[in-house]
Amino acid sequence: MYNNNFYKDDCCNLCCNPFPNCCCQCAIGPRGPQGLRGPQGIQGPTGATGATGPTGATGATGATGATGLTGATGPTGATGATGPTGPTGPIFIPQGTFYTFETGPFEPGAIIPITDETSTNTLNAFEVTIDGRVSVVNAGVYLADVRIQLAPGSAGVLRLQKNDESVADSYYSSFLNNDTNSSGLFVINTILIINAGDTVSLINFEGPQFTIELLGMIDNEESPIGNPTSSPSATIRLVRLSDI
């Protein structure tokens, strides 16, 4: 231990040796050369996390993955708006064909009764009355086509009537050619203006006073089994062309 009462001069003479009570101030010499780097100290504690940097550019799209399983069907969506109206369809033309196999004889003034109609007739457009007339349900302008097969050796005048009033007639006589083995075909083609509920019929005109018979069964000699054949003795076909 050093003496705390050591003289001041002694302190200075000793060039400021390290005594606690030294009063002198020695001059500081020049800095010596830097010493060698000491060994690295131990790593200090990790500092706080810095602020997040800006988002980088989007990377390239990766390859498409495999298709997943089909999901459950979702609920039905609301009904969409109605689309535009399509083009107009073909025009529907009411028509009907009516016939009979009656052969008579028919006295002058007698109606040739229509008894049947084809299955291709327009539904609910016509009716066959109980007395053999055709009743028209819808008013319009109609084409009327009439075919009547007169029996061989007969002559007569047949007329088409609307509401029991004659509108057209046809005349045939097999006697004109002295051919009593051939049948005669009456053909009437005319245009009729028909109101709803009007009737159309065929009549043996009473003026010439001919009682007529129509063609019935015909033996078909060329048939392998020799069966007789027949076709309607009278037909009326009506086709509606337009409104009145």
Image (cartoon, helix red, strand yellow):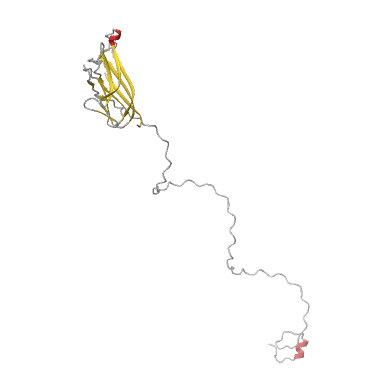
In the displayed structure image, the side of residue 77 where residue 150 appears, left or right: left
Q: Is residue 115 above or below residue 179?
A: below
**Screen quadrant of the N terminus:** bottom right
Q: Residue at x 32, y 18 (%)?
A: 187
Toward the viewer: 62 or 81?
A: 81
Q: Is residue 212 above or below residue 90?
A: above
Residue 212's image quarter? top left
Residue 142's image quarter? top left
Q: Residue reaching furthest front?
A: 207
Percent position (x, y) of residue 126? 28, 29
Circle count: 0
**Screen quadrant of the C terminus:** top left
In the displayed structure image, the side of residue 70 where residue 231 appears, left or right: left
Toward the viewer: 72 or 177?
A: 177
Percent position (x, y) of residue 50? 59, 65
Percent position (x, y) of residue 27? 78, 83
Q: Is residue 6 above or below residue 196?
A: below
Q: Is residue 190 visible?
A: yes
Toward the viewer: 57 or 16?
A: 57
Q: Is residue 231 visible?
A: no
